[in-house]
Amino acid sequence: MTLFKPTEVQKLALRLVKGGAKHILLFGGSRSGKTTVLVMVMVFRAIRFAGSRHLICRLRAKDARSSVLRETLLPALMNTVGSNGFRYLTHESMITLFNGSEIWIGGLGDREQADKILGHEYNTIYFNEISQLSYLAVTTAYSRLAMRTPGCRNLFLYDCNPGSPLHWAHTIFIRKKQFLTGAALIKPELYTSMMLNPADNKEHLADDYISDVLDAMPEKQKARFRDGLWVKADGVIYEQFDEAMILNSADMPAEYDRIAAGQDFGLNITNVKIGWVGECIYVIADYGAFNMTTKSFNDELTARGWFAIEPDGFGFPVYCDPAGGERLQEITGGVKANNSVESGIDFINAKIERGQFYVAAGCTGILSEVWDYCRDEGGEIIKVNDHFLDALRYAIFSDIQRGVIAQ
Ligand SMILES: Nc1ncnc2c1ncn2[C@@H]1O[C@H](COP(=O)(O)OP(=O)(O)O)[C@@H](O)[C@H]1O
Ligand SMILES: [Mg+2]
């Protein structure tokens, strides 16, 4: 049995966990020891507090099982409590420890999984690789940190390779602002973060990992994966989008020639409303929810006065993801969207390049995704941070395809 020996920065991270914060983020380059130390925190807490319950989640259950469970958690348990100290049945999402504590593991990106893991209360929730998780998915899980175990202070743990500077985690943990309103955090002392980089974990990495793998990456990837910086990724689809295109509400037009909205369905359900003034597109508002039925979502939009703007008195079209089928009938003004992904993206990019595209500062969904929506090395769109951007494309490009707006 080899006991866990933390690196120097992992020791600092352990100290951070023991400080007074409730939300603790470890961010930084890849293979810097973030997941290892947070998994150890979960294991220590599970051992120390008998009968406690802890959750590790990431976007895909499959990634949670391979990279967290098999590579990190099971070896950590073997080393600390030995094979007789815990039980794991491969088809289960849960490990039970000798003292009755449980560690659950799963994906938030799949409805059945999300329902299963969010059906319990926990003492620790660890969001692994949050650059892939939406703010809505994470905050939906917040209410589940409600288990009461004597002596145990409940905690949220997070880790990630940094995303773009507009990512929700950057807003909250680095800029210390509330994500949805941009106002200062109400209790900033509850949020803390720390950077860990591969150079800090050299002793556990192959000799050539930093010099031959990380140093050889393109600039922006190197900044993220070696140096742990929050920068726009390589292969960003809306690369030309600039912070100067974000407008305060006072600078948005008072009236629009035309209004339309786009609706995306799924576990992350989103609606984005846009307005046209001449050739210019203004993203007026966005709204999203996690794990909500279409009907409740539309009721919520209605209650928020979403459909109240009617420049011509006839309401506006809400272009719905065609894959949603019948669901569009539950959306006020629902019409089938055009889903030509590449032409839609080209159109929006042309608008951005010509300076004919603006986003209201309150559109946090759009802004959080715009610089993380990427292509992989083969040019394929990575379908991770795309919930609001898909809805945006339906709103803009369906009108173009229908010839309602002249190109
Ligand atoms: N304290 C430690 N002792 C032994 N190996 C470690 C330690 N910390 C990290 N490692 C190893 O370093 C590698 C990268 O760690 P990991 O936690 O997966 O990094 P990250 O989550 O930052 O990408 C893994 O192989 C892990 O087993
Ligand atoms: Mg990791």
Image (spheres, helix red, strand yellow):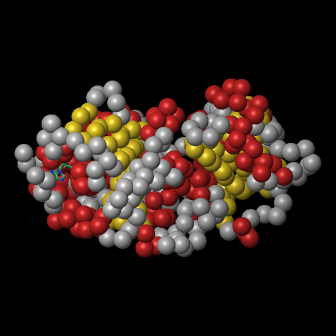
Residue at the spot 77% in from the left edge and 51% down from the top edge? 303
Quadrant in the rendering for residue 299: top right
Residue at the spot 86% in from the left edge and 45% down from the top edge? 315
Quadrant in the rendering for residue 229: bottom left
**Of all residues shown, which one is farthest toward the left?**
1
**Of all residues shown, which one is farthest toward the front?**
150
Q: Is residue 58 left or right of residue 301?
A: left
Q: How many marks?
A: 0
Residue 386 in view = yes
Residue 346 in view = no
Q: Toward the viewer: 40 or 241?
A: 40
Residue at the spot 52% in from the left edge and 34% down from the top edge? 111
Q: Toward the viewer: 371 or 115?
A: 115
Across and down, in percent, residue 332 comes to 80, 39
Q: Toward the viewer: 242 or 52?
A: 52
Across and down, in percent, residue 74 comes to 21, 39
Q: Is residue 314 left or right of residue 363?
A: right
